Image (cartoon, rainbow, N blue to C red):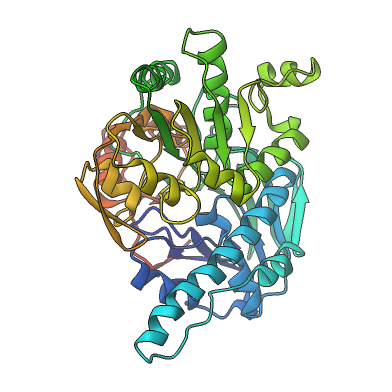
Amino acid sequence: MRITFHGAAQTVTGSQHLLEVNGRRLLLDCGLYQGRRDDTYARNLNFAYDPRTVDAVILSHAHIDHCGNLPNLVKSGYTGPIFATKATVDLAAIMMADSGRIQEADAEFVNKKRAARNEEPIEPLYTEADALQAAELLHGVDYDQPFEVIPGVTARFIEAGHILGSAAVLLEIEEKGKKIRFWFSGDIGRYKLPLLRDPVLPPPDVDYLLMECTYGDKSHHDPSQAFDEFREVVSRTIGRGGKVIIPAFAVGRTQELVYNLNLMMFENGVPRVPVFVDSPLAVNASDVFRRHPECFDAETRQFVEEARHPALEFKLLTYVRSVEESKALNERKDPMVIISASGMAETGRILHHLRNNIGNPKNTICIVSWQAPHTLGRRLADREKHVRIFGEPYTVKAEIATIGGLSGHAGQNLLVEYATAVKKNVKKVFLVHGEEKPALALMEKLKEQSMREVYYPELHSSVEI
């Protein structure tokens, strides 16, 4: 058995790991790499293996850095099944379609500039039609239900607590008479997050652990403390008559923010102002949330049973569907909260809201998630005073607030707890989905726990198991 790390290796994006077992190939995730625009196109376009030789894909969850290159995989010849939880199937379908539309729009934008320089046009990485074709290969499986992926490999999805439908993957592998238990964490969530069930730790009899390490150098505040910080940001912005502009991932983070805003305005004394979710993808994702109560925690299921769902519906909340409605928000001067995608402020309607509000010191731009290097979101989080939006320069006069404790990723403490759960039997631990600093910090913490066989693999490197 061999594993090759074709993505999310020494970086926090583009999850893609290829297992070769019994002469077959199994791909764990197939996400988009996100970073410098000049680098991303070629890196996402070209696979380091022939997609036609892959026999099956397992998808841990529907975030675009885990599912976003599946349409290109299918476009390049992959025809096998893509296994995921049922909620992930529904979310991935709309995520990939939305990504296809973005790929087409980005190519159109770039080609206008290329035409002005008499350069050949580029093709989009994939189209919405390609995404729809990939969605046809999705197969939904219940949590904790064993299923055969390829000969000799049985898989099971275990709650990861990261976003709706997210899962760790337990693989029970038999090859040449040898049995191996392999655990892929996907993205690990956190305890006590609103809406979702808590992540489940791996069992002690795991032989090999492939796990994320995004926040390997940092432990989060308790979610209640992050809620208090977020409430203070909203309160002081509204108090000075400003708008709170929040770049947020359409799946997971947006729904949690809506839940928190509802609580703070109706139970915690924050002035009641309009809240707008301005992202067609987030609107569609919220519809998927309603269809999958099996993913909710006990408190949220009770809300659903009582037909009162504070996470997704309250009086001041408006889901913006049309471009005209979105544009109208920029004409309004009254205090409000606008949540819009994308989460790293690279594409989508959030760019228009930032452009129209970044120069007003009454307003606040609230960063609520990890930001990849070289993105507009990272530049804002780093408090750069001058940024470019749609190629035009802007001076940042709005307040910049960062709320790290709202992250949907496990912090250092939980990552240590997660890894040491398999300490007794594990032969090797592979850290992925993390930059060098947090990965090395986590490795040191695990060494303190007498875990020595911990590795931080390079991109496209392989390990025999």
Which residue appears at 68% of the width and 27% of the height? 296
Residue furthest toward the left? 385
The quadrant in which residue 178 appears is bottom right
**In terms of depth relative to the viewer, which is nearer, 262 or 450?**
262
Position of residue 453 measured from the top left corner of the image (x, y, whole percent): 34, 48
Tell me if residue 60 can be seen. Answer: no
Q: In the displayed structure, would residue 228 be above or below residue 178?
A: above
Residue 314 falls left or right of residue 148: left
The image shows residue 272, relative to residue 65, as above or below, that is: above
**Measuring 75% from the left and 31% from the top, which residue is drawn there?**
294
Where residue 358 sits: x, y (%)? 32, 42
Q: Position of residue 387 (x, y in %)?
A: 25, 53
Towards the viewer: 161 or 264: 264
Residue 409 picture location, percent across and down: 45, 37
Which quadrant of the figure has residue 40?
Answer: bottom left
How many dots with numbers?
Answer: 0
Which quadrant would the N terminus be assigned to in this image? bottom right
Query: Left or right: 277 with respect to 288?
Result: left
Residue at x-position 36% and y-position 16%: 239
Does residue 135 appear in this view?
Answer: yes
Front position in the image: 307 or 443 = 307
In the rendered image, the vertical position of residue 210 relative to residue 189, given as above or below = below
| Whether residue 243 is situated above or below residue 134 in the rendered picture | above
